[in-house]
Amino acid sequence: MAVGQKQISPSVMCADFMNFGECIRDFEKNGIEYLHVDIMDGQFVKNFTLGTDFCKILKKETNIPLDIHLMVERPEDKLSWFEFGEGDYVSIHYESTAHLQRALAEIRARGAKPMVAINPATPIEVLRWVLPDIDAVLLMTVNPGFAGQKMVPQSIEKIRELRSYLDANGYENVEIEVDGNVSFENARKMSDAGADIFVAGTSSLFKKGVPMDESVKKFRESID
Ligand code: DX5
Ligand code: ZN
């Protein structure tokens, strides 16, 4: 996808696992572009969520590309544990490794699209010397580790600054993904500020009792 095309990446850790197959079929029917898979190791963040087998099952069950979000210490030691390939995004946190460039290069060498994630307090400038190694930046709009949090207020300004920073350095094709409290209302502001890929979780697509078709339609109206 190119910058400017708005894409939805539902955070599947927020899904109703008692009806997960139906949820995936709904996503396929609605042309969802990615499946955001949150992987947490209890070290980098104080939580555990999905794992390596879950990614394998998703790769078998659907053709929707994965958007694997690794919230783990030393991701360079763990990339080989995961199945991913062409068309998949794999994000690793700037804050989680001393070997960021090497890990991003490994993701690209395996045919997937490297994405670097930065926490709310991390300055954009840390990205300078890995810009050639990435296809996207995951700008965290909450502090990582849990669903259901409130967006860090200064996130919108940070999205705008990141878009300008990428363009000013000649990386107009690097996409921006936003993750955390991407509600219908926040999604509009994030889109206007320059976000391309939206991780939709508990505050938008996974509202109890609301048909997925309806939520996706409303979400697309918020971002287009
Ligand atoms: C938080 C995860 C997010 C989270 C999104 O660490 O990276 O993907 O699940 O959930 P909401 O949309 O509820 O903030
Ligand atoms: Zn995430």
Image (tube, rainbow, N blue to C red):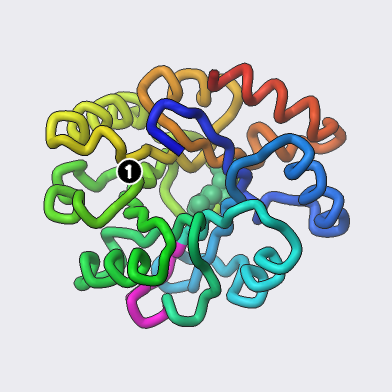
Q: Quadrant of residue 76?
A: bottom left
Going 69% across and 21% down the picture, which residue do you hit?
Answer: 218
Q: Is residue 63 above or below residue 97?
A: above
Residue beneath label 1, please? 120
Q: Is residue 212 visible?
A: yes
Q: Is residue 148 visible?
A: no
Number of callouts in the render? 1
Going 57% across and 52% down the picture, which residue do you hit?
Answer: 36
- Give the magenta part as a residue range: 70-78
Q: Is residue 180 above or below residue 13?
A: above
Going 20% across and 71% down the picture, which residue do you hit?
Answer: 98
Is 44 on the left or on the right of 96, as rendered?
right
Residue 191, position as x, y percentages in the image: 45, 23
Q: Is residue 49 above or below residue 117?
A: below
Secondary element under disc 1, as helix, strand or loop, is: loop
Residue 79, position as x, y percentages in the image: 42, 76
Residue 65 lies within the magenta run: no
Is 112 on the left or on the right of 20, as rendered?
left
Q: Is residue 126 above or below residue 168?
A: below
Quarter holding the C terminus is top right
Is 100 on the left or on the right of 114, as rendered?
left
Is ligand 1 within 8 Å of the beta carbon of the residue shown at mark 1?
A: no
Q: Amino acid at mark 1?
A: Pro
Neighbour tally class for label 1: few under 14, some 14-19, many 20 plus, Cα within 10 Å: some
Going 34% across and 59% down the picture, which residue do you hit?
Answer: 93
Residue 92, position as x, y percentages in the image: 37, 61
Residue 139, position as x, y percentages in the image: 36, 42
